[in-house]
Image (spheres, helix red, strand yellow):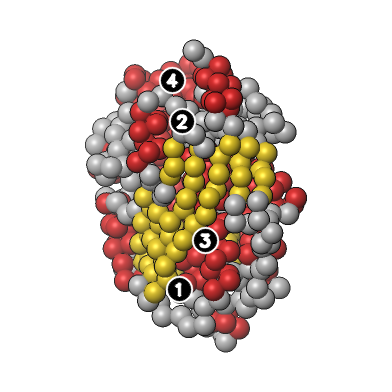
Amino acid sequence: MSRQDFYKKCRVDYPTFTYQGYSYDLDNKGISMTFDFAIDGLAEFHPTWFIPRIHEIADLDENLIDEMVFSLGMVELISYWKIACPPTVIIKDRALSDEQISWWKKLYWGGLGEFYYTNGIEETLDNFMMIKCESDKPSIPPKFVTDNAIKSGQLPKVMVPVGGGKDSVVSIELLKDKADVNCYVINSRGATDATVEVGELTDKTIYAKRTLDKNMLDLNAKGFLNGHTPFSALVAFSSIIAGYLNGLGFVALSNESSANESTVAGSYVNHQYSKSYEFEEDFRYYERTFIGSGVYYFSFLRPLAELQIAMLFSKFKKYHSVFKSCNVGSKQDIWCGHCPKCLFVYIILSPFLTLEELDAIFGKRLFEDEGLMEDFDKLCGILPEKPFECVGSRDEVNASIIEAIRIYDNKGIELPLLLSHYKAAKPVASDDFKAIVNAYSNEHGLNEYFENIIKDALK
C-alpha cells in the first residue's frame, strides 16, 4: 500500500485527534508539564516537559503561565497527530478564535511541508485539518511589562538557545558585550554542554527536558506515518516559558537569512520553515496578541548568511574541538562524516580554515569522499532538491566551493574528487564569494539591528 493510500485509510479509521488537556506543577525548582493527547480509537499520549528556574523571580502571573503551557501543547500535539493525520482536531480546554485557528493551521501546514513531500502524500491547506473547540474559555493575555533591566539602563537579559552547532556560538560571542547572556538547552548532549562550558555560561544555562511518549515510538515502529515536524516552533513556545520564569526579557535565536530558502526549488516545502523569518514574525504577533509574556523572541543572526556566520565562527578557535552540527552522530556526539549536514558545514568552513584545521574537526577530508557526490550535487544546485537538513542557500554553497577551488589552485594542490567534479559540471564565477561575504560583513549593521530589536521590544 502506498503512503498516500495508507494516509487516506488512517483518516477514515481514525477521524479525530483530541487535545484532552494538560497539567503542570510550578515550584522554586521549575515547571513540570504533562500533555494529554489521543488519536481516538488508536492510542493515548502523555509527553512531558520540565523547564528549570535558575533565577528567583517573584510575582508570576498564573493565568499567563497557564496560557503558555496550553500553547506549548498546541505545538507538541503535531508530533502525535501526524501518526494518523486525523482530519478533525478537537481542543477540549480552549475556545480559540477563527484568527487563532488560522494561525495554528498555517504553522502546521508549513511545518509539515517536508512530511507530506517525503511521504509522497498529496494534500491541501483547506482539507488537511479542521480544528474544533469544545470549550468557552478564551485566551485572555495579561498586560505585560517589558524587561525592567532595559529601562533601568542595565544590559538586556538575553537567553540564547544552544543546539551545539556553530551558529549559537557566534550569537553567544557577539552578544557578550551587548547583553547579560544566558543559555537555553533542550535535552542536553555533549556538544551543548561543552559549548556553554567553553563559553563560561554553565551556571547561567537553563537545561530543559522533553520526553516523547513511548506509544508514539511504538506506532512509528509498526509503520504508521512519520516524518519531520516544526521543532523550532517547540523551541519558540518553550523558550518564552523559560524566559518568563527566569526574568529574561529576550530570546535570541541564531537563525540566519538562508533559512528562508525552500528545500525543494519552486515549492513551499522548507525543512527550516519554523526557523524562517516568516515564522519569526508570525510567532511574535501571536505571542503579543494572545499570550503576552513580555519576552521578546527574535533571531540575532537573521541579517547574516551562513557564509558570514562561518567566517565569524572560524575566529572562535576555542569552540572548534567541541561544536557538533551532525544530526546522525548527535547521540554519539560525533561528526558522522557521511551525511549532507557534515558536508555542508565542511563546505562552508573550507574558505576560512586550513586543511589541518578541518582535519582536526571532521577527522576526514570530505571533498575526497565519492559517497557524498549526490549530497554535494543537491547542496550546490546541480540537483534541484536540497537535502532535508538545516543547510544554507545554494548561492552560499557555490560561493564557498568556488573559493575552495581558488585556494587549492593558488597553493598548487590537486583538486579533490568533489571539487574536480564541480569544476567540470558548472561554470565558475570569480567574484561570487567576495560579493556574498561583503554583503553581510558589516558588524556595525548587526549592532544597529540589535539596537532596533531593543526599541521594538519597548514599544
Where residue 405 sits: x, y (%)?
Answer: 43, 30
Query: Disc 3 vs disc 1: Cβ atoms closer than 8 Å?
Result: no
Disc 3 versus disc 1: distance between alpha carbons?
15 Å
- Relative to 332, 375 lies left or right: right
Asked which secondary structure carries label 1, the reply is loop
Is residue 213 visible to the viewer in this orientation of the structure?
yes
In the rendering, at what x and y percent does residue 386 appear?
Answer: 52, 28
Which residue is painted at 33% across and 46% down in the image? Answer: 324
Q: Is residue 270 visible?
A: no
Please give the name of the residue rendered at 26% of the width and 32% of the height, measured from the top-left corner. Answer: 364
**Quick check: marks 1 and 4 in contact, CB under 8 Å?**
no
User: Disc 3 or 1, which lies upstream in sequence?
Assistant: 3
Q: Where residue 226 is drawn, which disc sits there?
A: 2
The residue that label 4 is drawn on is 374
289 to 278, vertically: above or below: below
Query: Which of pointers 1 and 4 indicates the residue nearer the eye?
Result: 1
Residue type pointed to by label 2 = Asn
Q: Report how far apart the C-alphas of labels 1 and 4 lie in the structure.
A: 46 Å
Q: Residue furthest front?
A: 41
* Local secondary structure at mark 3: helix
Where 190 falls versus 334 (above or below)?
A: below
**Label placed on residue 378:** none
Residue 69 disc label: 3
Q: With respect to residue 349, does 145 lie above or below?
A: below
Q: Amino acid at mark 4?
A: Glu
**Residue bearing mark 1:** 246
